[in-house]
Amino acid sequence: MAQPSIFDQILDPASRANPYPLYAELRKTPVARQDDGAYVVSTYDEIVALLHDPRVSSDPRKRPDVAGETPAPEEGPPGIPPDFIRLDPPQHDQLRELATRPFGPPSSPGRVEGMRSWLAEVTHGLIDNFAGKHRVDIVDDFAYPLPVTAICRLLGVPLEDQPRFHHWADAFVATMDPSTGTFAERQRKRNHVQAELGEYMDGLADAHVRQPGDDLISGLLTDTGPHGPMSRKDILSTASLLLVAGHETTVNLIANGVLTLLRHPDVLDRLRREPDLITPLVEELLRYEPPVQMLSNRATVADIDIAGTTIPQGSPLVLMLAAGSRDSHRFADPDRFDPDRTDNQHFGFGGGIHYCYGAPLARVEAQVALPALAHRLVNPRLVADPPPYRPNPTLRGPRHLLVELDTLAPATEQEQAAPGERLTR
């Protein structure tokens, strides 16, 4: 029996707890062709080049057959076009601009930053629920409900509808696992999930037409700027994408952050003493333990010569972001968690025209959540190290993160005075 390739070993769930030694092996061959015709790229400079190369497409309709499957993936669910992260310019650029206007700079520079006080209130409400407990699951009790509450508030989803999204999120994330079926099969499953989400979002959009609010869907529906408003069909695909992608990655960012801090008690102590450390700490966390480990939804639309290899037109690409962010040719001592790192152009949010749309919100959520946990959990310690991981190699994070604690410290007077609504469970 043939020895599995390094990439196959990375896809194996048994490697999920620590894939980084395998990434180091992978980087010895910066561009590695796989048996199915895909090219895996693992070094920093080559990933940067391909993230910015217009000869690389994110549109699944341009992708050739994969693993012997000749039918091309469907364009999308009936009536719902592909979301903008699955489009190339100029369509991608137009939709991204429309999606950005009610979300962030330059049109709405204060929206995400203006959520910080409310996020602090929700954060401390969740931590208050730990009272009287000596063991908590950081994933189920904190890292999941915080970002899902945030993205639902941003989109204008009613609080009572939030539990419905757990099933959709799990199903959607499963379609990003390159070890589960062919690309075309995963696209069909993604389209099915997006159709269900789109039906829900259609009803939600109707409600926002009748009564617009200060939320993203209302903003997309009523945009009077250039090229606006976004079409109803594109609103459905954009909102469905954001509802899932806007919280799944942040769940892993927060859980990976807590795990990393508990493994580095000296940094945890510094964070308690030095509030300003949180900004570079989150950036280093995005490099060191990124929630998105790879991008497997790219393909070449022309021959590309890179690192001494010609990648033929029509080849699937896998960009190993987490491997690139630990490339010793780019980062000094890359396997060390160092929040004092200054030159830290990581791949935690990807790069190029598809740089993560939700990055500003994810950063704020982590910057609020991690210091709150650091200050309020008294003598926290891991129950199991490594913890159990989700099997998905793309969105990597603990499935559960059990932490024991002695007690809770109270929120500070400033935290208790933060405006907003408190989440109760």
Image: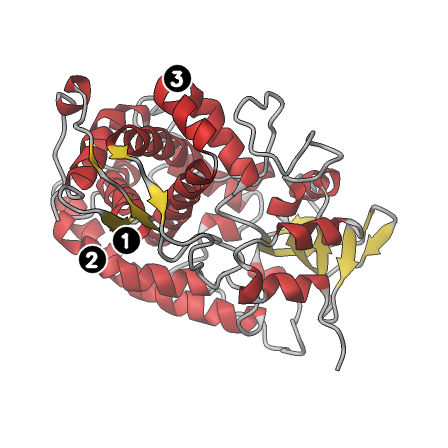
For label 3, the SS is loop
Quarter the N terminus occupies? bottom right
Residue 302's spot in the image, x, y percent?
76, 54
Q: Which residue is mark 3?
A: 274
Mark 2 or mark 1: whose residue is earlier in sequence: 1
Front residue of 211/126: it is: 126
Circle number at residue 140: 1
Q: Residue at x 57, y 53 (%)?
A: 18
Q: CA distance from mark 2 to mark 1?
A: 12 Å
From this viewpoint, is residue 153 visible? Answer: yes
Circle number at residue 226: none
Hey, which quadrant is residue 374 in on the image? Answer: top left
Q: Is residue 2 left or right of residue 144?
A: right
Q: Residue at x 85, y 52 (%)?
A: 309
Q: As shown in the figure, which amino acid type bears the numbered disc 1? A: Asp
From this viewpoint, is residue 74 visible? Answer: no
Q: CA distance from mark 1 to mark 3?
A: 28 Å
